[in-house]
Image (tube, rainbow, N blue to C red):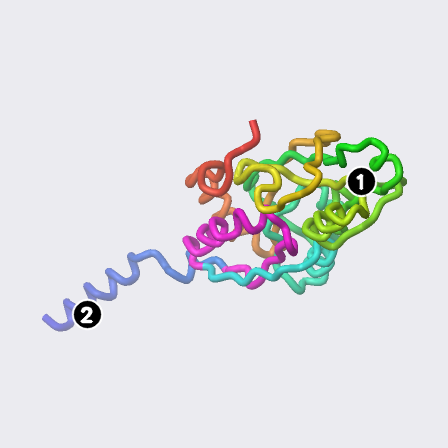
Amino acid sequence: MKTHVSFFCLALLLSLPSVADEHVQCPETLAIIQDDPLVEATLESFKALYLQLGCNTKFRELPGRRGILYFNKRIVDGEFFRLPLVEVEYSRPFVRSATPLFYISNSLWLHPNQKVRERLPLGYALGVVWQELYMKNRDGMAFYSTFEMYDAYQKGLISGFFDSSNPTNSQFDNVDLQPVPILGELISKLPLFHYLGVEHKEFMEKLSDLLKKENPYGRIILPVK
């Protein structure tokens, strides 16, 4: 009887799906843009998606341009979110999520006084590709974070700045900017994707399936209509 039981247990084990076969290597570290309000609004929801896939991945806060550099140098395995514009900056093979994490509206915000706008430069964030492209061949003042730009605006050092609006909160909810800036130009409405090194292609496929299943626009952020 013991022999028959042992044979049955062995047959049962062989019929079960292999855990090792299903296991996908987790990205160890991801870059997130330093002092970015959108990161603060969405990171915990995104971490929950990673945890559903069994990954307790670390998130490293970096200035925008350094996040790209660290990804190219393989210091980090990917970036939390980026516009597709960043892809020309990657020298390392990469994969992106099959669906956007969310959408944003990129805008230029200006001081309401035209005389101030005429004499002061615009502020923009280093490492934020769409802002750097807009400011190409234009005079401006560069900053390492959005909050630094807010502070410069408050101190009367710049006439305006760029910002990304989204439905997580009202524009400038957490910052009391005076005078209240006015919308100067709606530059674009674009999707933000998650990026990983190509070695994590299988993981990205599983994450993309989860994003589709969980309805990311309801889970992380509502899309801009």
Instruction: Identify which residue is drawn at 67% across, 62% down.
Output: 74
Q: Which is nearer the N-term, disc 1 or disc 2?
A: 2
**The one of 212 and 35 positioned closer to us in this rendering:** 35
Q: Is residue 51 left or right of residue 96?
A: left
Residue depth check, mark 1 versus mark 2: number of the one nearer the observer:
1
Tag 1, which secondary structure?
loop
Magenta range: 25-54
- The quarter in which the C terminus is drawn is top right
Residue 216 is covered by the magenta coloring:
no
* Residue 93 point in image, percent of width and height: 68, 52
Question: Residue at 70% of width from left, 36% of height from top?
Answer: 181
Quote the CA–CA distance across marks 1 and 2.
Answer: 79 Å
Residue 163: image x %, image y %? 68, 40
Q: Residue furthest bottom?
A: 2
What amino acid is found at the position of numbered circle 2 in the picture?
Ser
Residue 100 at what x, y percent from top left? 57, 39
Residue at the spot 71% in from the left edge and 29% down from the top edge: 186
Label number found at residue 6:
2
How many badges with numbers are in the image?
Answer: 2
Which residue is at the front of the view, 93 or 127?
A: 127
